[in-house]
């Protein structure tokens, strides 16, 4: 499943090519991709057609497009188009002449617009989903609990979709508070990786980037959170932020053709992973220091954790 860097790559692409444009027509080819829109296909089409995309906002792995009504007073609608990518969802920008993708589910025709060089932008936003775990739906926006913008976006207002209101802020969000995160970590009394994966504590971190951040911070995934000192929390926050920033610069992590950017390009951060998926291969940090330690894979929450047993020694009071 895409994690924060992959969704942020998509957000930036949409912000560049879709924000500010009007949705002129909506075609739903598979109603299953609208199952989260409880009022049905006709309501989805009727409320979306004619609206203008005001912004593209992300909090953690949640992505939404706040809408404006050009005919309304002030133009502001407290409604957003939400896109849930799931395991295989893709948001692609295409020319109207491009042949439909095999698993095309929803097609939005956008108003004409030019890029910074005066070249016409592609006319369609397509939602493609092979496994149909993702989907699109319209959501009401509500005020944020802290009064800060709902998430990361160019002009994000202090509004958030009801479905994402319970999600904590992520490490790339300007409103993220490291002090509050440390305090809540100490109160949680659980294992560190389990806490990092808790989207109610910090959003956007999944299995891949949790393992990478823990390796970079030299912390074991079973370190009890109530034993963390502020320097420990600072290390894991800085490590996770740095890892995801590098992944973002590389276009995200793609292990197959299912995750792509809005232009169909795959990310290449997988080649820079230090721990995740490298079981039985040398720890590069140990090798640089003259040691031969192999990355180890351990079972964790019905999935896997990858770590260096030398750099990340297991604590005596380990807590999963």
Image: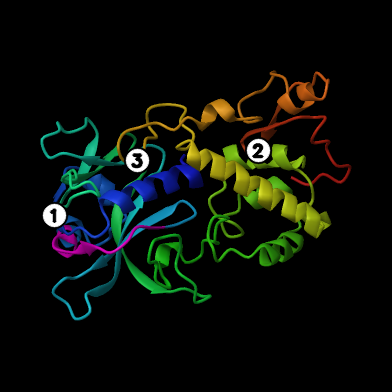
Inspect the magenta stretch and tell me whether residue 53 lies in it: yes
Percent position of residue 129, x then y: 30, 38
Mark identifier at residue 317: none
Viewer-side residue, 228 vs 5: 5
Percent position of residue 47, x then y: 18, 64
Q: Residues within 10 Å of mark 2 (few under 14, many from 20)?
A: many
User: Which residue carries the number 1 mark?
Assistant: 111
Q: Which residues are magenta?
A: 45-57
Q: Residues within 10 Å of mark 1 (few under 14, many from 20)?
A: some
User: Which residue carries the number 3 mark?
Assistant: 89
Percent position of residue 56, x then y: 34, 58
In this view, 300 is above or below 293: below
Percent position of residue 275, x then y: 66, 30
Q: Secondary structure at mark 1?
A: loop
User: Which residue carries the number 2 mark?
Assistant: 211
- Which quarter of the rendered picture does the C terminus lie within? top right
Name the side, left or right, on which 306 lies relative to 120: right
Q: Secondary structure at mark 3?
A: strand
* Res 170 quadrant in image: bottom right
């Amino acid at each position: 499943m895409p994690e924060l860097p992959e969704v942020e790559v998509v957000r930036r692409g949409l912000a560049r090519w879709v924000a500010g444009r009007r949705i002129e027509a909506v075609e739903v080819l598979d109603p299953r991709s609208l199952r989260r829109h409880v009022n049905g296909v006709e309501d989805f089409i009727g409320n979306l057609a004619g609206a203008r995309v005001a912004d593209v906002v992300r909090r953690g792995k949640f992505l939404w497009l706040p809408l404006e009504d050009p005919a309304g007073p002030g133009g502001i609608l407290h409604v957003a188009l939400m896109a849930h990518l799931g395991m295989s969802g893709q948001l692609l920008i295409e020319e109207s002449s491009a042949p439909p993708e095999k698993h095309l589910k929803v097609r939005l025709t956008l108003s004409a617009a030019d890029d910074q060089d005066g070249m016409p932008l592609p006319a369609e936003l397509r939602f493609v989903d092979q496994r149909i775990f993702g989907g699109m739906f319209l959501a009401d926006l509500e005020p944020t609990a802290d009064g800060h913008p709902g998430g990361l976006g160019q002009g994000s207002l202090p509004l958030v979709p009801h479905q994402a209101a319970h999600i904590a802020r992520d490490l790339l969000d300007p409103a993220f508070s490291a002090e509050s995160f440390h305090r809540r970590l100490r109160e949680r009394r659980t294992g560190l990786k389990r806490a990092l994966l808790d989207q109610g504590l910090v959003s956007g971190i999944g299995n891949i980037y949790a393992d990478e951040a823990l390796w970079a911070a030299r912390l074991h995934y079973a370190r009890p959170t109530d034993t963390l000192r502020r320097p420990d929390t600072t290390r894991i926050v800085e490590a996770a932020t740095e890892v995801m920033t590098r992944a973002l610069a590389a276009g995200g992590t793609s292990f197959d053709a299912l995750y792509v950017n809005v232009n169909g390009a795959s990310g290449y951060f997988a080649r820079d992973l230090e721990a995740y998926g490298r079981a039985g291969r040398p720890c590069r940090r140990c090798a640089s220091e003259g040691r031969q330690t192999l990355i180890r894979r351990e079972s964790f929450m019905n999935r896997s954790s990858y770590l260096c047993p030398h750099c990340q020694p297991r604590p005596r009071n380990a807590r999963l």
